[in-house]
Image (cartoon, rainbow, N blue to C red):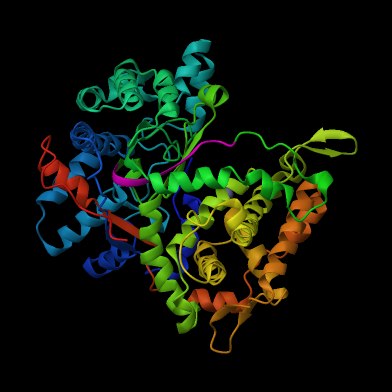
């Protein structure tokens, strides 16, 4: 699963809530956007240079990284094919069009990896293309109906049924026959996958890290065999300076059935400083659990092992991984067999989060915070709160007893669970960090928590600004609803103040108690599996007029970023030499 929009990971589909405040898009093949409209549409994605410090990589790894950057471009080619059968021809045509309109079209095409605008409900922005993205993308024949597919699948033997509905096959019509056939990815994209496999094997030969070598070799073999199981297991064990994710993963583009995986790549470098911070926080989670603001009987005396989290900086991305709204974090793999055996791993793209912070959260703060409070906006605290959010998903009641029967909060709260759980993680994230600030000497966290004076002012003010970013994406899914519960609760407790000029502020004499009591309420709803209580809290998940007014002022703030992979391009221009490649992260 990937989380496109940063704040606390509001999911990809949530973007449509922004539509009202964005430039109108003309649709249909006769009435597509002109140059001015296209430029406005592109401007919603603020261009952002990705520069990553590769100076600490070994000589072998630096060369391997160059190979992986090349492989990532092959993934772009495969994804273009998967997304729409006309994509390559359209792309070639646009590349030759040197008019101003042609350039604007090409730029927006590349952002979307096709002729449909992701932020506008996937409507066409080019003439003479289907008016809307095809629900089945290019995984199925364009004229195939759901009924035809389902009827056909029932006629197949069991192993063929599995293949037809599997992640790694496409469905095509047998030429000149009224028949469907199953084509494995390894056949459908054979030439591209051979190119990619060659680059992966070359990178494997160059790196000196055994776990990376193992993953790349097995993934290259999977490109030929179409069996991704062993390489998914190797990916779970990957722990190397170069953190690579490359292959077919997410099924969002198959809107017909959600069966088929799109190729994507994220070529990243591990962030050792943040990884150490995570380790330090993790070692204190039991202590935070022991001090949760609920009765001792509801606390967990022995926390289980948490799922692994990696913090990385992205060098380049390809295919579905560089398409529309940029991914800020992802949870993989999706194969249940691998998850059962090894669990899943969460990868957080720190420099992507930072870019989104700079290009969207900072301009938001100009509208919603008073000038003297903007100085407390802190990326360090922003990112540390995201890490705390992820970790505190593991705290609080998970195994509960209701009417004498063993059950879970998820089972009891049903469709309300995600919103309550997301709000819980946000609020417990604040609570846990406050606890760590208060006990940093005993916990030896002085060098782990973000440096600088007034940590509380930075933590809560940054959190306050980020609430607007979350709410901007709408209240139709769990993260938005969870955030609306929080802001309204804090407003009612007087912990968030609205000034006459429409800016917002934290009341520091009230915020800690308010966070503590909200944490208590959310945790008790989970501890008791209290569906009625959850329902009551969710009645608070509305946008109040003060917030709506503030959000209306944000229409000119970019929605997301458009990466320019500077370090990757430097590597690509000097393949194998590693020269002219040292660049430092601007922090
Ligand atoms: Zn979460």
Residue 455 visible, this orientation? yes
Q: Position of residue 448 (x, y in %)?
A: 49, 53
In the picture, the quarter occupied by the C terminus is bottom left
Q: Position of residue 125 (x, y in %)?
A: 29, 57
- Residue 311 part of the magenta segment: yes
Marks counted in the figure total 0
Q: Tell me which residue sits at (64%, 78%) in the image.
A: 507
In the orientation shown, which residue stands out farthest toward the bottom?
500
Q: Is residue 259 above or below residue 480?
A: above
Q: Tell me which residue sits at (48%, 27%) in the image.
A: 148
Q: Is residue 213 above or below residue 385?
A: above
Q: Position of residue 340 (x, y in %)?
A: 57, 24
Front residue (pair 212, 230):
212
Q: Is residue 105 above or below residue 181?
A: below
Report the span colored magenta.
306-317
Q: Position of residue 102 (x, y in %)?
A: 16, 58
**Horizontally, is 209 left or right of 463 in the view?**
left
Residue 8 visible, this orientation? no
Q: Main secondary structure of the magenta part?
A: strand
- Residue 82 part of the magenta segment: no
**Horizontally, is 121 left or right of 509 in the view?**
left
Q: Tell me which residue sits at (24%, 70%) in the image.
A: 36
Q: Is residue 339 above or below residue 545?
A: above
Q: Which of the 4 quarters of the picture holds residue 404?
A: top right
């Amino acid at each position: 699963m990937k989380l496109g929009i940063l704040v606390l990971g509001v999911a990809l589909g949530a973007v449509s809530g922004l539509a009202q405040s964005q430039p109108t898009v003309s649709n249909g093949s006769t009435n597509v956007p002109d140059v001015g409209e296209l430029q406005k549409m592109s401007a919603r994605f603020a261009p952002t240079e990705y520069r990553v410090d590769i100076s600490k990589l070994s000589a072998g790894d630096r060369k391997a990284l160059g190979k992986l950057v090349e492989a990532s471009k092959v993934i772009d080619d495969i994804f273009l094919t998967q997304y729409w059968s006309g994509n390559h021809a359209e792309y070639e045509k646009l590349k030759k069009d040197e008019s101003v309109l042609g350039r604007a079209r090409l730029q927006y095409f590349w952002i979307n990896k096709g002729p449909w605008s992701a932020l506008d409900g996937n409507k066409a922005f080019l003439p003479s293309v289907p008016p809307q993205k095809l629900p089945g993308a290019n995984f199925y024949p364009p004229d195939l109906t759901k009924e035809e597919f389902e009827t056909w699948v029932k006629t197949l033997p069991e192993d063929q049924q599995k293949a037809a509905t599997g992640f790694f096959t496409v469905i095509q019509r047998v030429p000149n026959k009224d028949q469907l056939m199953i084509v494995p990815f390894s056949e459908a994209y054979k030439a591209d996958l051979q190119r990619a496999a060659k680059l992966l094997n070359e990178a494997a030969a160059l790196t000196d890290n055994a776990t990376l070598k193992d993953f790349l070799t097995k993934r290259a073999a999977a490109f030929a065999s179409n069996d991704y199981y062993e390489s998914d297991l190797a990916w779970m064990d990957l722990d190397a300076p170069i953190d690579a994710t490359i292959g077919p993963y997410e099924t969002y583009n198959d809107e017909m059935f959600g069966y088929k995986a799109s190729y994507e790549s994220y070529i990243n470098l591990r962030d050792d400083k943040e990884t150490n911070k995570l380790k330090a926080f993790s070692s204190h989670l039991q202590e935070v659990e022991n001090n949760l603001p609920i009765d001792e009987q509801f606390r967990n005396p022995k926390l289980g092992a948490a799922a692994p989290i990696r913090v990385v900086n992205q060098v380049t991305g390809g295919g579905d991984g560089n398409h529309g709204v940029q991914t800020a974090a992802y949870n993989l793999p999706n194969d249940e067999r691998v998850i059962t055996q090894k669990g899943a791993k969460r990868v957080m793209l720190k420099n992507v989060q930072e870019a989104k912070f700079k290009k969207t959260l900072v301009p938001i703060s100009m509208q919603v915070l008073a000038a003297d409070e903007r100085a407390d906006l802190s990326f360090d605290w922003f990112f540390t709160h995201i890490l705390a959010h992820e970790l505190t998903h593991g705290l609080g009641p998970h195994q509960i007893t209701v009417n004498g029967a063993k059950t879970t909060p998820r089972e009891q709260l049903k469709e309300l669970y995600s919103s309550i759980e997301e709000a819980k993680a946000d609020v417990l994230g604040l609570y846990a960090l406050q606890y760590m600030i208060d006990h940093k000497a005993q916990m030896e966290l002085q060098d782990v928590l973000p440096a600088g004076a007034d940590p509380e002012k930075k933590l809560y003010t940054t959190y306050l600004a980020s609430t607007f970013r979350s709410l901007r994406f709408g209240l139709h899914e769990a993260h938005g609803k969870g955030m609306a519960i929080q802001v309204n609760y804090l407003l009612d407790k007087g912990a968030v103040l609205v000034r006459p000029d429409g800016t917002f502020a934290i009341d520091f004499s009230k915020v800690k108690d308010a966070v503590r009591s909200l944490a208590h309420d959310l945790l008790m709803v989970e501890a008791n599996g209290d569906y009625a209580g959850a329902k009551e809290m969710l009645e608070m998940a509305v946008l109040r007029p003060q917030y709506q007014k503030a959000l209306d002022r944000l229409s000119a703030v970019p929605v997301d970023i458009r990466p320019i992979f500077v370090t990757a391009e430097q590597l690509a221009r000097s393949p194998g030499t590693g020269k002219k490649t040292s660049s430092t992260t601007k922090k």
